[in-house]
Amino acid sequence: MKYFLTCILILLVLLSCGTPRSSLLTEPLFLMPNRITISHYGEETGGVRTLSEDVTYTEEVEVDADISTTEPTGLDTTHVYAIPSVTVISKARFAPVREGQVNIDFVIKIPKGFLSDDYQICLTPELLHNDSLVKLENVVLRGKNFIEKQKQDYERYNQYVATIIDPMGYDTAFINHTAVEQELERRRKTELNTYYTRWSQYQEYLKWQATEQEKYDLYNIQENAKFNRKIAASDKVYYNKLFRMLSMGQDTTLYAAKYRVKRKKLLASAPVHKQITLGTVPVKYRDIYQHGVKQQDIEPLLPEEKDSIRIASEHVMHERIALNEIKGSRKEEVFKRMVPAPYQPDAHYNATIAPEWNFNYRYTRPYPVKGNLKTLKLTLKGYITATDRSNYNIRRTDTLSYVISSMDELADGSLLTNLNFTDNQRRDYTAALQLLRNREYKRALDIFTDYKDYNTALTLACLGYNKRAYNLIITLGRSANNYYLAAILSTRLGDDQQAIQLLEEACKMDETKRFRADRDPEMSALVKKYGLTI
């Protein structure tokens, strides 16, 4: 009994332990101490001047009271883990507008702990400006095992699609061809039997007709012979008397007239020729006789194409068609189920994961600037999917800011004070300045062309007409604005030495140009390239 109780106790202990749960492939990501980050390009080497600000996001989350304060050894899906607040750093960089666009340029950094052959990482940069959120093209990384899993998913889905019949093929796929062929064969045999029956009947009719016609011909010949003898005898009597009367010199006129009447009556009494008529034809042959059927008219009425089509329409498998149409209507639903991670051919970048290395990617993309846009904010969201279908959501990363720096900011409004302007000119010039600040450069140039001053050259530069702008600006005399714009145009035209001289002169004449140089890529690149101290 003691041994028995011990066994029962051991069994109860084992049952109370339960079956150990299996870990999901994405479980380690929830316990990852570091995270995926983004930064301005060049920031990691100190090559970019940025302005930083701390932003704290606080979120109240109800947490299970029984969560252990010790560090967990694994992710417990029965508990809620919460972070009371997150502090991120928003870093700003000047983004110059060129030809109506700014260049979004940043680096995505993924620690190797997030990389696995069994993962697909899908990262979506998001631009925030005004009240809009714009999703940029994804960056997609796939492990080799995940790629193979995707191929298998697509193969399964393609096999499913292959079972769906196009409506144009219903006549082939959803007709009971065995039943159709059996019916056609039955009809062929029936028609052939009918043909042989009619053919035999026609042959019998021909035989009957020949025999009957022979009888009628014999009868008609005999009756005609009798009648002819009767006429001949009558004519003989008439002519004998006629000749006697003539020989006696008697008048034969009356006699001849009477005989003609008599002979006419005699001819009218001629016997009727017997012949085959409807009434004499046996009932079974009357159809042949009535329709004048000829032997060549008798042929088997075998099924034609229209008969095959009609018979096929009677053997349509409607249930299978309905099932096929249901399958066709569910293609999108089935695709989502069978291929939970579809290919992304339109991604900004697509690569295979190398799990043994950290991953850094420089993401560059032009972005159109419309209206009075001053700043852009960029963050990164995404998710990681594993081959076991488990997921890990990547929350928004640190925010990067782009301060829009446009050459239209260099517009000189003081030129409105030109004493030579008429009221109409001043009104037009004011409108052109507004168009320039709104980045409607072509419309602004239509007005500025008449003035050929600094703002005209600036508008030409904004449109990329660098040579025309340079040829105009060098004719306008000495000023910080003229020299600074000429320095920008010189770099664009490939004359760095002249650009350096013009920039230095501009900074001497106007101290603020030193700070402005950071916002114009031509000048900031020139300063960095030659180590200038302006």
Image: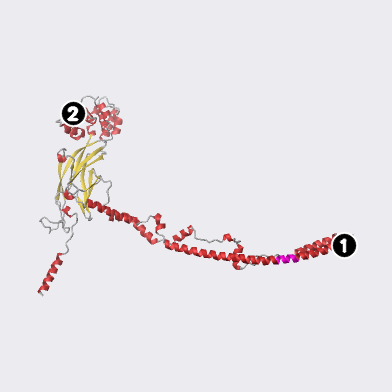
Q: Secondary structure at mark 2?
A: helix
Highlighted magenta segment, given as a residue range: 219-226
* Element class at badge 1: helix
Q: Residue 79, position in %: x, y?
A: 16, 58
Q: Position of residue 376 (x, y in %)?
A: 22, 41
Above or below, 55 against 192 in this view is: above
Please tell me how crowded label 2 is: few (under 14), some (14-19), or many (20+) other residues with Cα within 10 Å: many
Relative to residue 444, is residue 525 drawn left or right? left
Quarter of the image with the C terminus in it? top left
Left or right side of 313 for 61? left
Q: Amino acid at mark 2?
A: Ile
Please give the name of the residue rendered at 83% of the width and 60% of the height, measured from the top-left corner.
256
| Amino acid type assigned to the residue bearing label 1 in the image | Arg
Magenta span includes 222: yes
Task: Pick whichever, 209 or 125, lies toward us.
Answer: 209
Q: Is residue 271 visible?
A: no
Residue name at image x 61 percent, y 63 percent: 290
Q: Residue at x 11, y 72 (%)?
A: 5
**Residue closer to the observer: 435 or 530:** 530
Position of residue 335 measured from the top left corner of the image (x, y, whole percent) = 30, 54
Q: Is residue 204 something that shows in the picture? A: yes
Residues at circles 1 and 2 in contact by the CB criterion of under 8 Å: no
Residue highlighted by disc 2: 500
| Foreground: disc 1 or disc 2 | 1
Label placed on residue 244: 1
Observer-nearest residue: 210 or 181?
210
Gap in angstroms between the C-alphas marked 1 and 2? 166 Å
